[in-house]
Amino acid sequence: MTKAYILIETAVGKSRTVAARLKDVEGIDTVDPVTGPYDIIAVVGASDLNAVGNLVSSVIHTLDGVERTVTCLSVGN
C-alpha cells in the first residue's frame, strides 16, 4: 500500500467546494482544510505509485477550483 499526502492550492473562494467533492472520491482517506500556503491536505491510500499518480492527474486535477498540487509520498509505516 502506498500512502501520499496531496497538498492542494485552490482558487479564491473554492476551498470548501473542493474539500466537499474530495470527500466523496474513492481512495482519498482524509481531507483537511488547512491554513498556510496550501488550502487542503488530502491523504491518499493506493495500491502503488502509479495509482496515486492516476488519482491526482485524472481526478483531483480535474476538479473545478484546483489550481495546483504537490504530492508527498509517505516513507514511514
Image: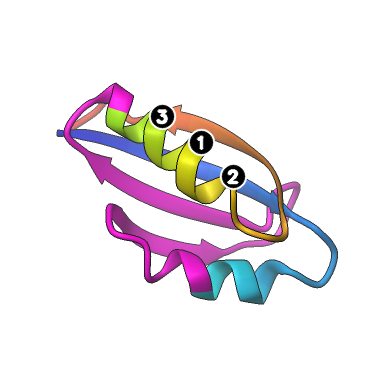
> Is residue 28 on the magenta stretch?
yes
Which of the marked residues, 3 or 2, is nearer the chain's N terminus?
Answer: 3
| 10 Å crowding of disc 2: few (<14), some (14-19), many (20+) | some
Find the distance from the CA under tag 3 to the CA under tag 2. Answer: 11 Å
Name the amino acid type tagged 3: Gly
Apparent side of residue 24 relative to residue 38 in the rendered image (left or right): left
**Picture coordinates of residue 25, whole percent (x, y):** 36, 62
Q: Quadrant of residue 55?
A: top left
Residue sitting at the far right:
12
Labels 3 and 1 touching (C-beta < 8 A) = yes
Find the distance from the CA under tag 3 to the CA under tag 1. Answer: 6 Å
In depth, the one of 59 and 20 nearer the eye is 59
Apparent side of residue 11 relative to residue 53 in the rendered image (left or right): right
Q: Which residue is mark 1?
A: 57
Q: Which residue is mark 2?
A: 61
Q: Which residue is mark 3?
A: 53
- Residue occupying image coordinates x 38% and y 50%: 43
Kindly tell me whether residue 31 is visible in this rendering: yes
> Is 55 located above or below residue 11 in the figure?
above
**Picture coordinates of residue 53, whole percent (x, y):** 41, 29
Name the amino acid type tagged 2: His
Range of residues picked out in magenta = 21-50
